[in-house]
Image: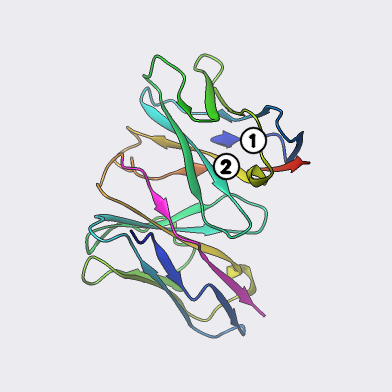
Amino acid sequence: AQKITQTQPGMFVQEKEAVTLDCTYDTSDPSYGLFWYKQPSSGEMIFLIYQGSYDQQNATEGRYSLNFQKARKSANLVISASQLGDSAMYFCAMRETNSGGSNYKLTFGKGTLLTVNP
Amino acid sequence: GAGVSQSPRYKVAKRGQDVALRCDPISGHVSLFWYQQALGQGPEFLTYFQNEAQLDKSGLPSDRFFAERPEGSVSTLKIQRTQQEDSAVYLCASSLTSLFGEQFFGPGTRLTVL
């Protein structure tokens, strides 16, 4: 079974509007972390935001916020006030803290290609 | 400060050639990771170093893949007798601590095997 599922291969948004990128995950570990990375065409993975499984509040970083619904095992990324420079691939990833000692591995989804239209 | 750098950025190899991909992590970072990203996919874990020790190589796809980090800083991923299915972007990441630290990624090396 996929550990990270991103069901949207591509998304379009108008500049200045908000967009939500979906991510669901599958784990039996009680302790885990969820990450979102941005990958522009240059190839580098840029860290955006992190949510720990025990965090009470949803994470926010500037225009990025994470809509964390633990019972539904979803960790959607919300980008507010989209900018042209936000056009990129976005990856959701998970690190399982108690995964038999390999609690450093990131497991990634297949990504969502976001296009921001002017 | 300098981030993670990788070289070469692009590599074209003929099937059967050996290749070596270099990663320079952020200075002082204990942990170093290699990931393989096939076209249209997310990165997949290959191997993990803590300083010079290779603690996990469970993601290496075959014994043609070999990684080293002899002095605990620069790392090299070597692929012997390359095959077409090895074509991918190879990403290197480093983190300051061995556990829980944010992983900082390099720009990757795009390997094309003809």
Q: Is any atom of residue A101 visible in this view?
A: yes
The amino acid type, in three-letter code, at marker 1 is Gln
What subunit carries mark 2?
A: A
Q: Which residue is found at the position 35% from the left and 36% from the top? A: A99
Lateral position of residue B24 relative to residue B12, left or right:
left
- Check if mark 1's residue and mark 2's residue have beta carbons within 8 Å: yes
- State the residue at coordinates (33%, 43%): A102
The image's colouring method is rainbow
Q: Which residue is mark 1?
A: A6
Q: Secondary structure at mark 1?
A: loop
Which of B9/B60 is in front? Answer: B9
Which residue is identified by label 2?
Answer: A91
Tag 1: Cα neighbours inside 10 Å, few (<14), some, or many (≥20)?
Answer: many
Disc ID at residue B29: none
The image quadrant that residue A41 belongs to is bottom right
Residue A1 visible within the image: no
Q: Position of residue A91 (x, y in %)?
A: 57, 42
Label 1: chain letter? A
Rendered view: A82 above or below A40: above
